[in-house]
Image (tube, grey):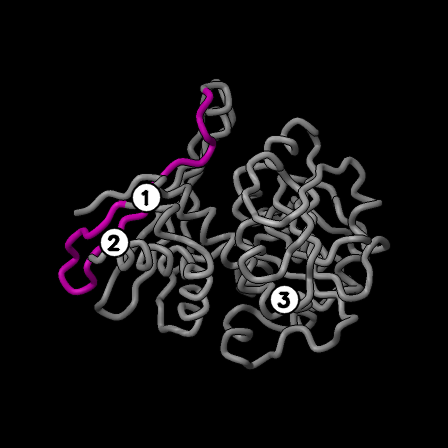
Amino acid sequence: MRSFSADETREALAYPQTIEALRQAFQSDIEVPVRHHHTMRRQSEPAATLLLMPAWEGEDYVGIKILTVTPGNAQRSLPAILGVYLLNDGRTGAPLALIDGPTLTVRRTAAASALAADYLARKDSEHLLMAGTGALAPHLIEAHCAMRPIRRISIWGRRREKAEEVAAGVKQPNVEVQVVDDLEKTVPLADIISCATLSTTPLVQGAWLQPGQHLDLVGAFTPEMRESDDEAVRRSSLFVDTRAGCTQEGGDIVQPLQQGIIDPEAILADLVDLTAGRHAGRTDEKEITLFKSVGTAVEDFAAAKLVLERAGL
């Protein structure tokens, strides 16, 4: 069995190859059982969570991502999310690869957003606003730049020093990078607004949105969290990575559904529909599009297979 470090996993999951692997995966017969969440109580710190995300494709491969989410790790100078992806031979069950879980997760998550943007963002999108300065931010920037002719990147975070760290790490050629302090002033200027935060209250207000924009919501992965307000949802054409996931887990969709702001039919398509051509995605240059993702084991499985293939195994 081959083990892949974080650096090796990052190198194997280059864009746009990862985006194309996901495009193909959403059209494949990959079996994805419901993910398992197990709460692990702690006496002296917040509860941790064990996540199990299995998937398989015929007799080719069977894989599972095993992650722990441990909020108390902040006190230990460790990442909250740690884990691995195990990819096995589908016929024999023999282990083939053990892949760094956090790196695989951020790469496939960013690739899914860029894949959606390929259908939903205007082809001439040049200004990307990144709201959020966590582990996903650099990957989302890189992925969106791989699919659209981004020439200007604005970065916003609750702590300016963190935004400056993200800005300093951007390595895109011929791109202007700036840190911004005012979302209300910056949102109307952007072509693509990507949010990856842990916010429990809306950050992007619908009143700020302009015709032709694309809103990419990656954070808010529980029903209690929000990155957009109800007006943003009302004004936008709605798309998701998976209907099952976003209507149960993502607060930006769950809360408007529960409150009757939208009904399930307001979700026009998921990534299966978009990649299959059952929905064209953006149909008008002035349309405001919103993509909500919560993640799916399909993406992990596709990324793990690509890591193996890039290694020649």
In depth, the one of 15 and 221 nearer the eye is: 15
Residue type (three-letter) at the residue carrying disc 1:
Glu
Residue name at image x 45 percent, y 54 percent: 108
Q: Regarding mark 1 in the picture, which secondary structure is present there?
A: helix
**In the image: residue 46, left or right of residue 302:** right
Query: What's the magenta region?
Result: 77-98
In depth, the one of 175 and 3 nearer the eye is: 175
State the count of labels.
3
Image x and y of residue 231, in percent: 81, 57
> Tag 1: Cα neighbours inside 10 Å, few (<14), some, or many (≥20)?
some
The answer to whether one can see residue 226 in this image is no
Q: CA distance from mark 1 to mark 2?
A: 9 Å
Residue name at image x 55 percent, y 36 percent: 169
Residue located beneath label 1 in the image: 8
> Tag 2: Cα neighbours inside 10 Å, few (<14), some, or many (≥20)?
few
Q: Earlier in the sequence, mark 2 or mark 3?
A: 3
Examine the rendered structure and indicate whether residue 13 appears above or below residue 8. below
Residue 60: image tag: none
Examine the rendered structure and indicate whether residue 233 appears above or below residue 95. below
Image x and y of residue 84, in percent: 33, 42
Residue type (three-letter) at the residue carrying disc 3:
Phe
Residue located beneath label 3 in the image: 239
Residue contact at pointers 1 and 2, CB within 8 angstroms: yes
Q: Earlier in the sequence, mark 1 or mark 2?
A: 1
In depth, the one of 232 and 118 nearer the eye is: 118
Image x and y of residue 266, in percent: 70, 70
Q: Regarding mark 2 in the picture, which secondary structure is present there?
A: loop
Residue 311: image tag: 2
